[in-house]
Image: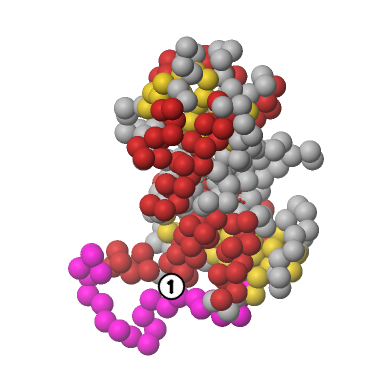
Amino acid sequence: DSPRIVVTRALPPAALEPLHSVGQVWVSPHDRPLSVAELHQAVDGASAIISMLNDKIDDDVLDAAGPNLRIVANTAVGYDNLDVPAITHRGVLATNTPGVLVDATADLTMALLLDVTRRVSEGDRLVRSGAAWSWDISFMLGSGLQGKQLGIIGMGHIGQAVAARAAAFGMDVAHHSRRPVEAGGSRRLPLDELLATSDVVSLHCPLTAQTRHLIDAEALRSMKGSAYLVNTARGPIVDEAALAAALAGGEIAGAALDVYENEPEVHDGLRALPNVVLAPHLGSATVETRTRMAELAVENVVATLLGKDAPTPISVPST
Ligand code: GLV
Ligand code: GLV
């Protein structure tokens, strides 16, 4: 019997090609995430699941898959949607797609940082509205970046790539990370000091029990009134209701978000504010990067089904 390979959402067909030599491939026909019921039905008897970041892979899904399952290959670097202990407990391998989306995500972080500090999207809305406007010495002023402090929370590959870009814009980079990292020129600060002294705070940590609501009402209160928050990591790292309140109350100057607490829903309070840039989870969304992510997920499955080492297994941290 040829192994059943389940792909929960369409990926570029060329990237999927290598799967056909190792199993029977089922690709979701839907242009949306599978419902829980559809996911359970789809994975029945699967040897491999290629999952997306909006598929929750928990014990119920693993039960639905049954004993043939050998790998869950997440098409994302973040894997908070996988119950990794439950997966590995069953002797199933979990993999993600690190490395290949570092530059794309760092680029989008800079796009959002520039957008919110220079009011690009706000200006776009103004121009489209047809309202009268004219150049004026004090019209729609934003905030310059040179000499300002960027505070990076989570100094992995993406955080470091953002640091390099920000340095090229003349920013002073500081960071907060659990472990010390070799990050040329960037000072490591305790979280409270980083929040209190940064002009822009950018999140690049994974979503874990420790980072859920890391940015809550108290953290937001401790930031400068002139500071901006950028989140291209995971929505639940920020208490979205607290962020909406802090922005409405002028506790910080603005925010630029690519991810949301209850994605794809966005807090009404955020949508109502002019000083918030809202992007629809585009961090890795370039043709080149999405292709590499799909290819890497496929490489992980092919290697595993052939009994070889998968290139990017998720190593469960030993903290
Ligand atoms: C995208 O958000 C990813 O984790 O790859
Ligand atoms: C992100 O892709 C990483 O490798 O840290």
Residue plotted at (67% across, 45% down): 211
**Number of numbered discs overlaid on the protein picture:** 1
Where 151 falls versus 78 (above or below)?
Answer: below
Residue plotted at (61% across, 80% down): 147
Badge 1 element: helix
Q: Horizontal and vertical percent for residue 220?
A: 62, 57
Q: Which residue is mark 1?
A: 118
Residue plotted at (55% across, 70% down): 165
Q: Is residue 228 visible?
A: yes
Q: 187 or 115: nearer the eye?
A: 187
Q: Is the CB atom of the residue marked by disc 1 within 8 angstroms of ligand 1's nearest atom?
A: no
In the image, 34: left or right of 97? left
Q: Is residue 54 visible?
A: no
**Image-quadrant location for residue 91:** top right
Q: Is residue 118 magenta?
A: no
Q: Where are the magenta residues, as a range?
A: 127-149
Q: Horizontal and vertical percent for residue 70?
A: 59, 22
Q: 307 or 42: nearer the eye?
A: 307
Q: 3 or 275: nearer the eye?
A: 3
The amino acid pointed to by label 1 is Arg
